[in-house]
Amino acid sequence: MIFHSPSPIGQISFLATSASGLNFNRPGEGGERGEGVRPFILSPSPYMRLFYKDGTAHAVCHSGYFARPVDPSRPWEIADSLKPAEPSWEVLPRSIFIEEIKSLLGREDELESGALALRHCSLRTSGDGRALEVFFSRAFESPEHILHAVVDISPKDWREWRLMGPPAKLLCAEEPWEGEC
């Protein structure tokens, strides 16, 4: 289970394991041997949503930042080159959901502070593994609604992945008390 929690450097992602999928406690706290919260930082970004591309784990994080393991052969372990306090996953320094939405929607003023950037998301890869569908809400949007975007993940270099077009509204408020879309 990937979860996020406050830390001295902000909300970050951690990993917890459980043989049963129900008990994530450490052994000394009633958990199973070898299970529990791993004593390392998975990612410096919260809200990680996992997907696999060509057998390698990747994630979409808060604000639409992509992440991948420092050591793709060992995504759930501390890389040999790291210390437990260093993230074992690297995060791209830019978010296509901020940069490209700014240009596609012409809303630079609202996006500078992170407003209207991707918040919570669900993912689905295409059958051929060339596209990633992202269903998401945006931070501070009122009323909140669900959008859909498609990311071209066909390039081998993950730094070249791009949105295939502007996000589309998928689900909006229907009743007056829900707000208007």
Image (cartoon, rainbow, N blue to C red):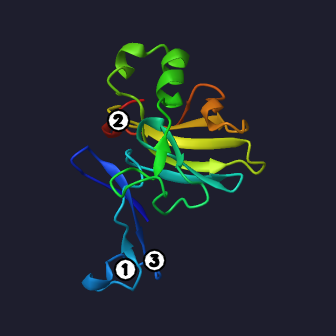
Q: Which residue is mark 2?
A: 176
Q: Is 109 above or below relative to 71?
A: above
Q: Is 57 above or below relative to 117?
A: below
Q: Which mark is residue 33?
A: none
User: 140 left or right of 148?
Assistant: left
Name which residue lies at 56% across and 30% down.
167
Name which residue lies at 34% across and 65% down.
39
Q: Secondary structure at mark 1?
A: loop
**Tag 1 near tag 3, CB within 8 Å:** no
Using the numbered discs, state the Cα–Cα distance from disc 2 to disc 1 in whole angstroms: 42 Å
**The quarter of the displayed image where residue 117 is located:** top left
Question: Badge 1: how crowded within 10 Å, few (<14), some, or many (20+)?
Answer: some
User: 36 left or right of 167?
Assistant: left
Q: Earlier in the sequence, mark 2 or mark 1?
A: 1
Find the residue positioned furthest to the left.
Answer: 8
Q: Which residue is mark 1?
A: 23
Kind of residue at disc 3: Gly
Residue 173, given in percent of the width and then of the height, sits at 42, 38
Using the numbered discs, state the Cα–Cα distance from disc 1 to disc 3 in whole angstroms: 6 Å
Q: Earlier in the sequence, mark 2 or mark 3?
A: 3
Q: Which mark is residue 21?
A: 3
Residue 25 or 118: which is nearer the viewer? 25
Question: Badge 3: how crowded within 10 Å, few (<14), some, or many (20+)?
Answer: few
Question: Badge 2: how crowded within 10 Å, few (<14), some, or many (20+)?
Answer: few
Tag nearer the camera, 2 or 1: 1
Tag nearer the camera, 2 or 3: 3
Using the numbered discs, state the Cα–Cα distance from disc 2 to disc 3 in whole angstroms: 41 Å
Q: Is residue 121 visible?
A: yes
Q: Secondary structure at mark 3?
A: loop
Q: On the rendered image, what quadrant is the N terminus found in?
A: bottom left
User: 119 left or right of 70?
Assistant: left
Name which residue lies at 38% across and 39% down.
175
